[in-house]
Image (cartoon, rainbow, N blue to C red):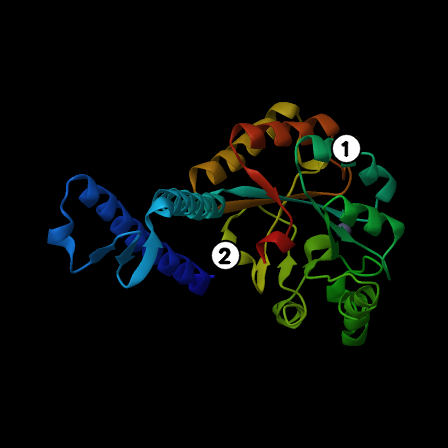
């Protein structure tokens, strides 16, 4: 990335040098100042020698304009790249396995340009995985059978949390993010899982992260299930507080999760999820998948 930037800047400098020389020759010709610039620019009748390179006079304006436009485009792209890097965002994920419910909201996600991560319980990819991936969402992992990892043997831990990576790979799925069922883990598990996953996610509280924090790291996530919010007012105030903090601090990420979009305790109501989408638009926050940040 840094090397590409240096190469781009080197090309830009070279182009700029030639452009300056061209502008000089055009100005010099107009003002009959060629004599004073002979060390740099030599007029050879039909063509002109600039820093040892020959240019036909009739093409000089076209080349100058072309170079100017090219420099503008490259500068614009670099500025755009920097702006994207600074844009704060939201990681929204859904845990367990509720494909019929989740599918109903694909269109709503599209309406707000929302990409989400599904941390699923499954032993191999399903039709839902294909559909979600084709809509730009990420398939991540949550163990095969939603077991409490702190209560199983080491062998079972590998079978539930690590072995399926290879199975998914055989079907063309690269699984790089993992979420703990019940949010329960030990330090040993984090170390072991991070050998295979880029991000391991918890399930308890809100923490604001930098975009660079999602490479071989454990990160927390804030549950937004209905059970935690007794009223829409409390929900909206909490969401506004978290998203505003992210928008004020450039290049930061808020991680939120639920299980389904519905009226149950362990779901988030659809008008509440839409409130998040509208607030994100208002605050210019982008929705990322976990893989986007790795
Ligand atoms: Zn779960």
Which residue lies under the disc numbered 1? 107
Is residue 207 depicted above or below 41 in this figure?
above
Q: Tell me the residue at 70%/59% (across/down).
A: 178
Residue sticking out furthest to the left? 36
Q: Where is residue 57 in the image (x, y as percent from the top left)?
A: 32, 48
**Front of the two marks 2 and 1:** 1
Q: Which of 33 and 252 is in front in this view?
A: 33
- Of the pair 240 and 287, the residue shown nearer to us: 287
Foreground residue among 208 and 282: 282
The residue carrying pointer 1 sits among few (fewer than 14), some (14 to 19) or many (20 or more) residues within 10 Å by Cα, namely few
- Find residue 6 and report its horizontal and vertical position in percent: 39, 61
Q: Are dots 2 and 1 in contact, CB under 8 Å?
A: no
Question: Which residue position holds label 2?
Answer: 212
For the C terminus, the quadrant is bottom right
Q: Which of marks 2 and 1 is nearer the N terminus?
A: 1
Q: Residue 193 bears which disc, if any?
A: none
The answer to whether 9 appears left or right of 24 in the picture is: right
């Amino acid at each position: 990335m840094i090397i590409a930037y240096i190469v781009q800047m080197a090309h830009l400098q070279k182009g700029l040098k030639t452009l300056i020389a061209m502008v000089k020759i055009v100005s010099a010709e107009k003002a009959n100042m060629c004599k004073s610039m002979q060390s740099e620019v030599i007029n050879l009748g039909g063509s002109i020698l600039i820093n040892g390179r020959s240019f036909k006079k009739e093409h000089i304006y076209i080349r100058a304009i072309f170079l100017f436009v090219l420099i503008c485009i490259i500068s614009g792209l670099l500025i755009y790249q920097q702006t994207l890097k600074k844009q704060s965002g939201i990681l929204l994920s859904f845990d367990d396995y509720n494909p019929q419910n989740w599918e109903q909201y694909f269109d709503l996600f599209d309406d707000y340009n929302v990409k989400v991560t599904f941390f699923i319980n499954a032993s191999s990819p399903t039709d839902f995985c294909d559909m979600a991936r084709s809509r730009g969402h990420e398939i991540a992992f949550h163990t095969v059978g939603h077991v409490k990892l702190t209560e199983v043997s080491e062998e079972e831990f590998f079978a539930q949390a690590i072995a399926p990576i290879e199975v998914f790979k055989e079907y063309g799925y690269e699984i790089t993010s993992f979420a703990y069922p019940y949010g329960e883990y030990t330090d040993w598990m984090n170390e072991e899982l991070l050998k295979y996953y880029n991000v391991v996610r918890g399930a308890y509280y809100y923490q604001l992260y930098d975009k660079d924090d999602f490479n071989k790291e454990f990160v927390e996530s804030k549950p937004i299930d209905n059970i935690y919010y007794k009223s829409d007012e409390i929900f909206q105030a909490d969401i506004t507080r978290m998203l505003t903090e992210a928008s004020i601090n450039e290049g930061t990420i808020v991680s939120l999760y639920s299980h389904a979009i519905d009226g149950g305790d362990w779901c988030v109501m659809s008008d509440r999820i839409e409130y998040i989408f509208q607030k994100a638009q208002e605050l210019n926050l982008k929705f990322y998948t976990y893989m986007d940040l790795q």
